[in-house]
Image (spheres, rainbow, N blue to C red):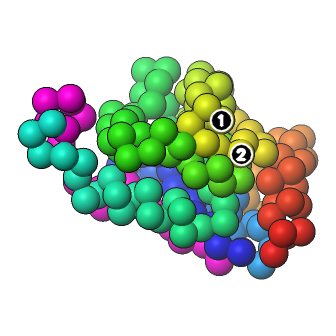
Amino acid sequence: MKLLAFGASTSSSSINRTFANYAANSVEGAEVTDLDLNTFDLPIYSEDEDGANGIPHAAHRFKELIEAHDGLVISMAEHNGSYTAAFKNLYDWTSRIDQKVWADKPMLLLATSPGGRGGQTVLEAAAATFPRMGADLLGTFSLPSFQDYFSEEEGITDPALAQEFAAQLNLFAKPLSQAA
């Protein structure tokens, strides 16, 4: 099964990208594509820009990547309680191609942050919106205090959080593995 994983951030040291890839690579038998949002150079969305120049190639490429995978693992970065500007712009452009941005793909939706809420505000917003935009949302999980509860070698280091994550990962992975 092919999984597309990305952190909804353009930071070169994105903890959300790290977390999304950790989760995707935790799915047994998965072939993971690690997506870097920095590869999508787009003008700021506006009706005027769309009317004058059409939908940029980068938005079409993003949509094609979504459609070419069996499942999506996205970890939302939170800027001031909302989506990052780069992610929101890509999301807006892609929705001009097809309202079902997520192409009815199974999705594991995550968030993490250095703080104690772990990006819960943006996770809640995405969980409320993404199903209306074609996401088959199978699981959600927020990891608080990333530097305290995650290590590259061990993954999630807090036993209770690790157990909660494993349950959400299973909700996502089980139907995918049965379909494969």
Regarding residue 124, the answer to whether it shows in the image is: yes
Q: Which residues, given as a range, are shown in magenta?
A: 31-50
User: The disc labelled 1 sits on which kind of residue?
Assistant: Pro
User: Where residue 82 sits in the image (x, y, percent)?
Assistant: 47, 24
Q: Is residue 57 above or below residue 8?
A: below
User: The disc labelled 2 sits on which kind of residue?
Assistant: Asp
The residue drawn where x is 75% and y is 66% is 26
User: Where residue 5 sits in the image (x, y, percent)?
Assistant: 57, 60
Residue nearer the viewer, 169 or 15: 169
Q: How crowded is mark 2: few (under 14 residues within 10 Å), some or many (20 or more)?
A: some
Residue nearer the viewer, 129 or 158: 129
Quadrant of the drawing holding the C terminus: bottom right
Q: Is residue 40 magenta?
A: yes
Of callouts 1 and 2, which one flags the residue occurring earlier in the amino acid sequence? 1
Tell me where residue 18 sits by quadrant. bottom right
| Residue 162 in the figure: left or right of residue 129 | right
The residue drawn where x is 66% and y is 54% is 105
User: Where residue 152 sits in the image (x, y, percent)?
Assistant: 64, 63
Residue nearer the viewer, 2 or 114: 2
Q: What element carries label 2?
A: strand
Residue under label 2, please give it.
136
The residue drawn where x is 52% and y is 60% is 66
Tell me where residue 95 sits by quadrant. top left
